[in-house]
Image (spheres, rainbow, N blue to C red):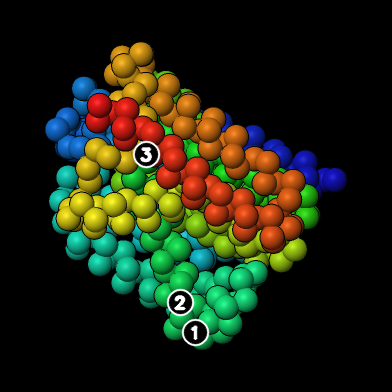
Amino acid sequence: MQTDSIELGFLSIFALITFFIFLIINNYSSKISNGIFLDDDFNKPQSFHNEAITRSGGIASFICLIFFFGIYYLLYSELLIEYFLVCSSLFVIGYFDDIKIRISPNKRLFLMVITLFILINFIPIRINNIDFIFLSYLMESKIFSVIFVLICFLFVINGANFIDGFNGLLTINLIIINSILLYINLNNDHLKISYFITSQLIILVTFLLFNFPKAKMFLGDSGSYLFGSLISLNSIITNNLNPQISSFFFCILLFYLFFEVFFSFVRKTYQNKSPVLPDREHLHMLSFISISKFYGSEKGNYVNSIVINLVYGFFILPSIFFADNSLICKIWFFSLILIYFLIYQRLYRLTKN
């Protein structure tokens, strides 16, 4: 009981410090190096704002996270090495773009693949619980296991980066996912991972105050890569700690993040476009076009985030009640694919007519 009180006390202090870190960085980042953090490129396909906004949410989040690593060590005398190595490496890759050091999409993807390949082998990172017999058998091969985990990371991290164009869209989505992961771990007395997930929720909620409904700062590529890597690790570790839960449940939970990337890759290839270059035909962009007809572009920006996450929550939250039923989770997962196609097709026709 006393330990719980100490942890809650540290979390309260951490929440206060997190707010002030975001406040300070938000106020001063636009003045650093002639506005190097300012996102003033309004012509890129994924831009939906008309004023220069600082992309310093990623660095604020990273500073808060480093601070929490220190708190975690004081409490448990443990270093979260796997988290630190993965999230800091991915943060740095995204940070280059935030300070306007342009790296081509192909080179960035190559750098990401090499970095993740080394880390997955070095740490190592494994997915132990897979309730798909054929895949479970293949995972016994180390090289296949590494490649599979690498692909999972790539899909989720790039999915996070894909949807980070609207105020609150990615952040609310991550809050929903982390809240469900926290519920699972608390329910099964995995307190250490629960404590760390709670710290991420504090950072995300604090950032949301500065990003929603009107954006004062963006996560930037560094932030979306940072949280994409964190949510990947959170899901893998939760999956490994809770073997009674179907691995397909985690596929359901992360469906929007990874399937957006998979579908976009297939769609762009079919359209003879480069799969790594952005366009305006992602589901969240098509929904924005429809919503902005009623609310205008400024209000439509955050209304779009609310609508998408409400739909996401509507289809995802019920799966908590049958998370331990592999068959139902599989059916639910493949149903989501069909639902995604139907929604996308409907939105595509509405925007093209």
Secondary structure at badge 3 equals helix
Q: Point out which mark residue 142 bears.
A: 1
* Distance in Å between CA atoms under marks 2 and 3: 35 Å
Mark toward the start of the polypeptide (3 vs 1)? 1
Q: 98 or 23: which is nearer to us?
A: 98
Q: Are marks 2 and 1 in contact (CB under 8 Å)?
A: yes
Residue that appears at 31% across and 72% down? 114
> For the residue carrying disc 3, how many other residues have a C-alpha within 10 Å: few (<14), some (14-19), or many (20+)?
few
| Location of mark 2 (residue) | 146
Q: Quadrant of the C terminus?
A: top left
Q: 246 or 71: which is nearer to us?
A: 246
Task: Give how far across and how far down residue 28 sits, in percent.
Answer: 29, 29
Residue that appears at 30% across and 56% down? 265
The outermost residue toward the right is 1
Residue 344, visible in the rendered structure: yes
The outermost residue toward the bottom is 141
Q: Amino acid at mark 1?
A: Lys
Secondary structure at badge 1 equals helix
Determine whether, in the image, residue 122 is placed left or right of residue 332: left
Q: Point out which mark residue 345 bears.
A: 3
Q: 275 or 87: which is nearer to us?
A: 275
Q: Quadrant of the N terminus?
A: top right
Secondary structure at badge 2 equals helix
Mark in front: 2 vs 3:
3
